[in-house]
Amino acid sequence: MNLLPFALLPGLTAAICAAHDTIQDGVEFLRAHMPAQDRGTVTQERLVREVRLALAARSQFPWAAQVPWELYENNVLPYAVVNEPRDEWREQFHHLFSPLVSPCKTGREAALTIASHIQKTLNVRYSTERRVPHQGVKESLQSGKVSCTGQSILLICALRSVGIPARMAGVLTWNHVRGNHNWVEAWCDGEWKMLEYNEKDFNTPWVMSAISMLDPRKPENAIYATSWKKEPSGAFFPMIWEARYDEKRHALAFPPESRTVPAVNITDRYMKLANKWVAAQPEYVPGSRLMLDIREERKNGARRLPLHVILKSEEGKVLAEGITPGPSDDMRKFLEVLLPDNISRGMLEFKLPDGTVRHEPVAHTEAPVQILNLSLIHISEPTRRRGI
């Protein structure tokens, strides 16, 4: 078998070169947990090549050598992330990104260096014009356009190419707006860190804020991370691009062929992380967060209506006020007001365009955030926005 030049890097020690059992263990691991779709197309030669390259990175970079083997084989050795085309990317990405991280001393430093330079290095940007969400590396590099899923695939491959364990994480639906989101987790400092394409730091602010609004009691608000090996729970990563809408259940359904990527449920960890992040913000005050959106129902559809809203205590004291979003505002924007912990109930007051003053009672609930999407037709019955 011809070995790629990367497998003969000076940093590859004789001990690693001679570790045929380790190579064989890696190949057997990949094959044992290989998706059914790959069994007739991904060859033994390809698997050996992937493992050799991954072991070369493990020998070359100090952070890679410190990763427990079980974690390394599950999150560095794999040649794919979800069900994207099985392009060979490892050697190419190593040559692109190893010079960037060569001055780095830690995996944390290396991961942040790659994330902050990857867009410039690859010249690939987020675009709604991408062909499909789960593009392979080759198509993404050729087109220069990707979704958040495509961005995550590129970043994961880049991190794995220099021996940093990486996996995709994502939420099926947000609690406050339509849509899903996928991002990356990188193993640094002995734990998984939330990282995104073209970001300079962990824990992207808008994502942390959005996660803090999730209701973990709702299955559609759960957060999962990919795994190569099958997990005892039998959980699968929700590849939304393969889902179908069930009209009877009014929910997304995942056919068997879409359940091919094992996953771990990491909702609790992210809820704690996001709530901690929110609490660390300078403007944070303990209380029940209310996200307000007021819509005027019309024959041709609903229109967001910018109205001045006042939150008062039952005694009439003004607690907060502001303007709800209008038609031209980003769909993720809401008027956020706070019902303090020491006040159990409050009243929302706002004046409609016809001069009518409306009042809506609010109170603390078990939900981390109350999403109140008020309709002028059914204004007396505030409803939470439902995820798709």
Image (tube, rainbow, N blue to C red):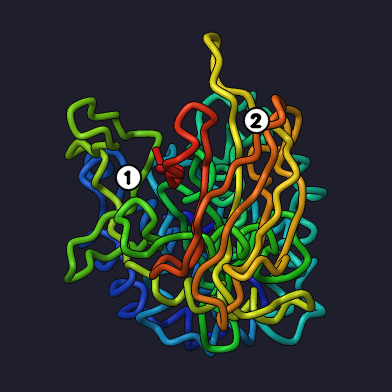
The residue wearing badge 2 is: 304
Is the residue 128 above or below the residue 87 in the image?
above
Q: Which of 5 and 73 is in front in this view?
A: 73
Question: On the rendered image, what quadrant is the C terminus found in?
Answer: top left
Question: Which residue is more in the foreground, 273 or 130?
Answer: 273
Residue depicted at x 29% and y 72%: 24
Q: How many marks?
A: 2
Which of the two labelled residues, at mark 2 and mark 1, occupies the earlier sequence position? 1
Which sits in the foreground, 358 or 229? Answer: 358
Residue 15 x %, y %: 48, 88
Amino acid at dot 2: Arg
Vertical order, 292 against 195 (above or below): above
**Are there few (<14), some (14-19), or many (20+) residues within 10 Å of tag 2?**
many
Q: In this view, does 22 lie to the left or right of 162?
A: left
State the SS at label 2: strand
State which mark lies toward you, 2 or 1. Answer: 2
Closest to the observer, 315 or 163: 315
Q: Which residue is drawn at 68% across and 71% down?
A: 202
User: Residue, x 58% and y 75% (percent of image)?
Assistant: 287
Q: Residues within 10 Å of mark 1 (few under 14, many from 20)?
A: some
Q: Can residue 8 be seen in this view?
A: no
Is any atom of residue 383 visible in this view?
Answer: yes
The location of residue 371, given as percent across then percent down, is 51, 52
Q: Is 321 situated left or right of 27 in this image?
A: right
- According to the picture, the residue beneath numbered tag 1 turns out to be 42
Hey, what amino acid is under mark 1? Val
Q: How far apart are marks 2 and 1 (CA)?
A: 51 Å
| Picture coordinates of residue 294, whole percent (x, y) | 60, 37
State left or right for residue 9 relative to residue 269. Answer: right
Residue farthest front in this picture: 315
Whole-percent x, y for residue 196 in the image: 65, 59
